[in-house]
Image (tube, coloured by chain):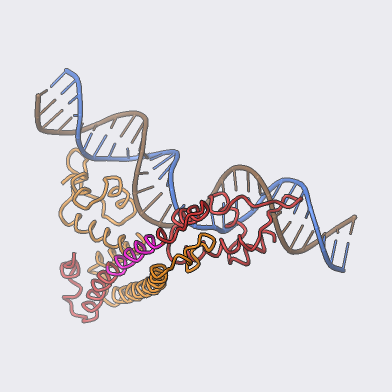
Chain colours: A orange, B red, C brown, D blue
Amino acid sequence: MRIGEAAAAAGMTTKTLRFYEDSGLLPAAKRSSNGYRDYHDDSVARLEFIRRGRAAGLALTQIREILSLRDTGEAPCAHVQDLLSNQLAELDHQISELMALRSIVAGLHATAASGTDASCDPEQICSYL
Amino acid sequence: MRIGEAAAAAGMTTKTLRFYEDSGLLPAAKRSSNGYRDYHDDSVARLEFIRRGRAAGLALTQIREILSLRDTGEAPCAHVQDLLSNQLAELDHQISELMALRSIVAGLHATAASGTDASCDPEQICSYL
DNA sequence: CTCAACCTTCCCCTACACTGGAATGTCAAG
DNA sequence: CTTGACATTCCAGTGTAGGGGAAGGTTGAG
């Protein structure tokens, strides 16, 4: 499929696909005889994986690391295992940070929800925040 | 108080205070006779509000909205509650996406740890995609 | 008087993740 | 044969949240 179709399938723009290729998140796409990039379903799956990672707040560099681990299936297992351990630890760290932030925001939200008119005095600037 | 003192009191840099003034989060500060910005405790309270909002993951544009509601004499609490709800939903989404990715990476890690030749089979490692 | 520690404006720089647009090429339909 | 929708490369800009540093003014201490 051509870039437009692949982009639409992954919910992205063609610009983004070229950008991802330049950034090393996608391997250089095969070209048709006319020079157009030619994508397969695998590429769309990869794009969807990237999209999920982005939605989770991962940076492209982090997604690139995960993908390159996946791509080096023939690399020495011990090395890959180390890298995967690091990725796992990093993910755990990010999850715990996000969960801490969530509980802070949940607390703020609960306080805001229980607010009386008095606590909504404009002078107070929403003092619970 | 001068900008350095106000910045220190709010846990920010002087650069950040000038940036916030340029960005419309702070009103243009009064100036002393020497041209230096002159801050009062109110400004520090406002800065602390901004800092708490940032810590809760709000963008400066969102904080600016809250503050400008408050500045026009309107109690922004309902608006803040909305923002916090959205923030909470967004955090929940991010956390669940991260946990999904974590389980993918954990699966890869477990496979790599099993140490068979099969675990180094690119086809198998790619199978989650 | 000089020096350090402040302050001022000004402009540019950073990283991230794209996005826009120009100039050009390709291709199927009418 | 032309039109429109695709595609290509390349360069440049956007938005976010500031940071770096120059060139100069102000102030208190020694």
- Quarter holding the C terminus of chain B is bottom left
Residue plotted at (15% across, 46% down): A1
Rendering coords of residue D15 (x, y %): 43, 48
Rendering coords of residue C14 (x, y %): 50, 54
Quarter location, residue B113? bottom left
Residue plotted at (21% across, 81% down): B114
Magenta portion: prevailing SS class: helix
- Quarter holding the N terminus of chain B is bottom right
Frontmost residue, B86 versus D14? B86
Frontmost residue, C25 versus B37? B37
Q: Is residue C3 left or right of residue A18?
A: right
Q: Is residue C21 left or right of residue A70?
A: right
Bounds of the magenta span? B81-96
Q: Is residue A86 magenta?
A: no
Q: Is residue B91 magenta?
A: yes
A13 above or below B93? above
